[in-house]
Image (spheres, grey):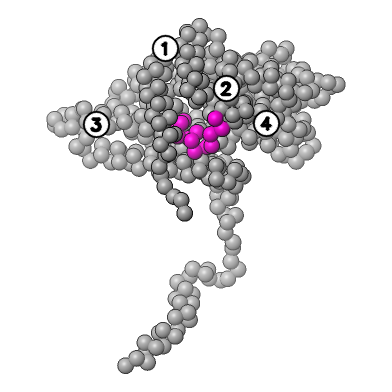
Amino acid sequence: MSWDFETDDAFQAELAWIDDFVREEIEPVDRIVRDPYDVGDPVRKALIRPLQDVVKQRGLWACHLSPRLGGRGYGQLKLALMNEVLGRSICGPVVFGCQAPDSGNAEILAHFGTEDLKRRYLDPLLAGDIVSCFSMTEPQGGTDPTLFETSAVLDGDEWVVNGEKWFSSNARYAAFLIVMVVTEPDAVPHHRLSALVVPSATAGVEIVRNVGAPGEPLGEGTHAYIRYTDVRVPKDHLLGDRGQGFVVAQTRLGGGRIHHAMRTLARIRWALDTMCERALSRTTTGGERLASQQFVQQMIADSWIEIEQFRLLVLQTAWKIDRYDDYKRVRGDISAVKAAMPKVYHDVAARALQLHGSLGVSNELPFGDMVLDSFRMGLADGATEVHKVTLARQVLSRHVPTDDLFPAYHLPRVEAQARRQLAPVLAALQEDP
């Protein structure tokens, strides 16, 4: 039996190096680079490219990829521990070549792309020369793939794409988009979709507007509302087989949700750290430290407990993925991670905001953005409610109903069974004078 909570010494040394590198070299860059996905920004090139070179020399570039593709082939547990550190920094994942959605798109191209697609798009993506977009969500159907309407019809040697997509993150910077389209309209719901590579410069690809978060100017966000009008792409830009789009999408989502959770956990833990510093530094009107107030102590204790519970759930799920190598088997666990994350994120960030008073609600600290981001996390990669339904179905599938009037665990029935099982002992006790 092997059961422990230790990290092997060699990988722990790598984590320590990553921690120092993020703190000393990458976090200062966060305050200067406007958007780490804007590969055309000269400031971004000057500051991020040298850091990427250091990571590559260290052998920690794109560790989620197999050695054949230039990575380390790390399992989900190691990747989770790495992302727990990288999540402290906006630029951290980009510096280490594991940023979403590019990491997932690279896996899709590696699994399902032709050699030509890999040469044209995967190679520069892995090198960090370009970024990409996963264009799935639709205005009328959200993230429910059974409601998608964007279509692709084969016309000779080309696919013709028509429709609209919503919240296609980083499309404004992307060299190509992986677009989920309906190619089999008469098939059963989960076999209607296919995935296509669409170069961003293709005629008919129109960014209607870029959507941002509250507080950002209209049209200045990074989540594109895209219209595809008679967009023609070569026939060989299909990823996988026709009708296999749902399978293609799942290739990128399972592990990606774990990485997302650990990066979010890093931000949550940072919020707890700020709460502790604030509580120890500030005094009440009576001259006592905030840290001596029971309400503040409860906020800190609740936050610590929630963080540790969530972290263990994430790491156990990552371990299960590595152990079973079957995302279907761990589907319920992944849904649990996804469903738990927004609440922990919201509650800890909200407490940190409250504890910092007027400074906490200002734009000079990120707590307001974090609270708002917690709601986005409840929608990204599938709404929380959907994942709870998935989890409940998985849990229920492991149980069976009873046709008896009273259940097997009904206490009178349990006691009667116990008396029958232990009857010889009880009888002997009664005979013993």
Q: Residue at label 4? A: 111
Please give the range of residues in magenta: 72-84
Instruction: Please rate how many residues cluster around mark 4, counting C-alpha atoms within 10 Å: few if below 14, some from 14 to 19, many from 20.
Output: some
Residue flagged by tag 4: what amino acid is it? Answer: His
Quadrant in which the C terminus appears: bottom left
Q: Looking at the picture, how far across and down is residue 22, in whole percent?
A: 40, 22
Amino acid beneath label 3: Ala
What is the secondary structure assignment of the residue under circle 2? strand
Residue bearing the label numbered 2:
169
Quarter holding residue 73: top right
Instruction: Report whether 132 appears left or right of 317.
Output: right
Q: Is residue 110 left or right of residue 87?
A: right
The amino acid on which the numbered mark 1 sits, given as a three-letter code, is: Ile
Measured Cα–Cα span from mark 1 to mark 4: 36 Å
Which label's residue is closer to the chain start, 4 or 2?
Answer: 4
Mark toward the viewer: 1 or 2: 1
- Residue appearing at x 52%, y 69% in the figure: 408
* Residue drawn at 25 percent across, 39 percent down: 297
Q: Is residue 81 magenta?
A: yes
Q: Going from the N terminus, do you reach mark 1 or mark 2 first?
A: 1
Q: On the image, numbered disc 1 is attached to which residue?
A: 32
Q: Please, what is the three-letter code of the amino acid marked with disc 2?
A: Ser
Q: Earlier in the sequence, mark 3 or mark 2?
A: 2
Instruction: Please tell me in which quadrant of the rendered image residue 30 appears.
Output: top left
